[in-house]
Image: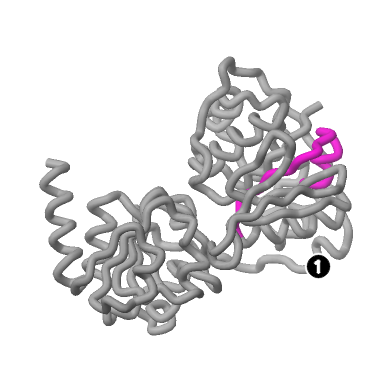
Amino acid sequence: MANVLIFIDNPGAALKKSSLELLTLGRSLGETAVAVNGELSSDVSAAFAEYGVSSVYRPSARDLDDYLVAPKAAYLTAAAQAAGATTVLLDNSPEGKEIAARLGIRLSAGVITDVVAVDQDGTAHKSVLAGSYNTAAKTTTPVSVLTVKANNVTPEPAAAPTAPESVTLDVPADSTSAAARITAREQKVASGRPDLTDARIVVAGGRGVDGDFGPVEQLADALGAAVGASRAATDAGWISHDAQVGQTGKTVSPQLYISAGISGAIQQKAGMQTAKVIVAVNKDAESPVFEIADFGIIGDLFDVLPQATEEIKKRKG
């Protein structure tokens, strides 16, 4: 029986890097099983084998996405019990955190969110208080539920591939889980850029763009990066709210975070301070963002960003 269960929701045609990170982290902690919701492509199945997964659980019900998170939590509870898991790993998305909370109640398990690393003994490391402190925590319950931030583990296939066992689980049904049903969805227009929370590079703009995200988007496209924004920029309607990074937005942990025209207030720091390298561009030399930046450029973003974009394009040929 696997002692680590990993939840991958709607993997699509191929696994995202963040999912491969979870598989790699899980394997470092013990034998891994995966609970999948959604269709399972041949490429995804091959990736599970390549990353050493021993079992793949699938729900008998195919309508979990027609409801809010409660049925997924019920399914994951059944999968954890079937696998005999002592550790459950989920992504650190808002939905992942909500499922983790419900799972913690169902399994009487300790829950730790915003995890960036896990030791062999189960000690979880996380960044707290807007990145001002690093903490180590360990649950005292038989089962631990951890949500893991992306871009903190290097994906590595197993030394030898496996042949995962496929298991179908009945999803426990109750009136509470199905009390709220999704009645409509609207497809988001694809930008062609990486997902913000998974991106290795993020270029973010704030109040300093003054409504013009053109230089930010052009630099992001040259770098193959995602586009982020401060709350001031999203509240002004200059960019969609799903691009917001910060305490009330998304938390990102890229290898490179470029902040353009953002003051670096505590709310923004909370969403990006765990980035490996932070580059700040701001014409205010007293801006708080320079206190956390690894590299700072005092200048107008409308001068600096286009020059950087052109130089990157030249170097890429």
Q: In the image shown, does 34 or 26 lie closer to the viewer?
A: 26
Q: Residue furthest top?
A: 160
The residue that appears at 33% across and 65% down in the rendered structure is 259
Q: Which residue is mark 1?
A: 179
Q: Where is residue 220, by image quadrant?
A: bottom left
Q: Is residue 293 left or right of residue 28?
A: left
User: Percent x, y for residue 219?
Assistant: 24, 58
Q: Is residue 190 left or right of residue 50?
A: left
Instruction: Please tell me which residue is depicted at 26% across the width and 55% down the height of the picture.
Output: 221
| 184 in the magenta segment | no
Secondary structure at badge 1 equals loop
* Quadrant of the image containing the N terminus: top right
| Name of the residue lying farthest toward the bottom | 236
**Of residues 272 and 168, which is closer to you in this image?**
272
User: Vertical placement of 161 versus 115: above or below?
Assistant: above
Is residue 88 one of those drawn in magenta?
A: yes
Q: Which residues are magenta?
A: 76-93
Q: Quadrant of residue 204?
A: bottom left
Q: Position of residue 180 (x, y in %)?
A: 75, 68
Please, is residue 120 above or below residue 244 in the view? above
For residue 265, which quarter of the picture?
Answer: bottom left
In the rendered structure, which amino acid carries the disc numbered 1?
Ala
